[in-house]
Image: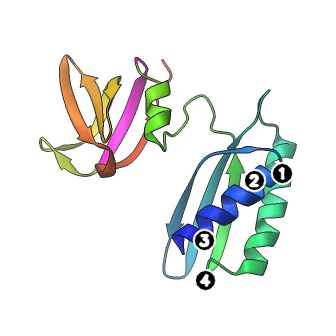
Amino acid sequence: MQNALDNLVKNTVEGLGYQVWGYEYRPHSESALLRIFIEKEGGISIEDCANVSRQLGAVLDVENIIPVAYVLEVSSPGMDRVLFTLEQYQDYIGEKIKLRTQTPIEERRNFKGYLIKTSDSIVTIKVDNQEFEIPFESIDRARLVLD
């Protein structure tokens, strides 16, 4: 199902002339949340979000990929954008981020500090003069922090 959802989101959003920054899919037993972040040159308007929401909602209903009732949210990534890919992390080296891991690393799951570097599968964050190397696959969610 994940591959089908990936393709459907990407093809629909890009077909409308936008870029997919990323998306979150949170399934539950009786409902689900699908949150899509879109971008385009010059920024995203409310009308852009509404257009993508209408089209994507129609395609999702026809394709019936999500087997339960769902909520669809479409927005811009915003200034405090969530980071989804290693390439996105690379673009924000030196910036302050907040990061949560799926399992504890050095007895903690929450980190807030400066993104130092990335490698093939490691994100390094500096928190209070201490560097933490975090495997990319263990990151649950990360976003930029505005000062």
Disc on res. 16 = 1
Disc 2 from disc 3: Cα separation: 14 Å
- Segment tinted magenta in the rendering: 94-101
Q: Earlier in the sequence, mark 1 or mark 4?
A: 1
Q: Earlier in the sequence, mark 2 or mark 3?
A: 3
Disc 2 from disc 4: Cα separation: 21 Å
Label pair 3/1, CB-CB below 8 angstroms: no
Label pair 1/2, CB-CB below 8 angstroms: yes
For label 3, the residue is: 4
Disc 4 from disc 3: Cα separation: 13 Å
Q: Earlier in the sequence, mark 3 or mark 1?
A: 3
Quarter occupied by residue 76: top right
Quarter occupied by residue 119: top left
Q: Which residue of the protein is positioned furthest toward the left in this rendering?
A: 106
Query: What's the amino acid at mark 2?
Result: Val
Residue 72 appearing in the image: no
Query: What's the amino acid at mark 3?
Result: Ala
At a point 76% along the width and 35% down the height, the residue shown is 40
Query: What's the amino acid at mark 1?
Result: Leu
Nearest the eye: 127 or 134:
134
At a point 76% along the width and 59% down the height, the residue shown is 12
Query: Does residue 84 sit above or below 24 in this rendering?
Result: above
Other-residue count near label 4 (Cα within 10 Å), few / some / many at <14 / 14–19 / ≥20: few
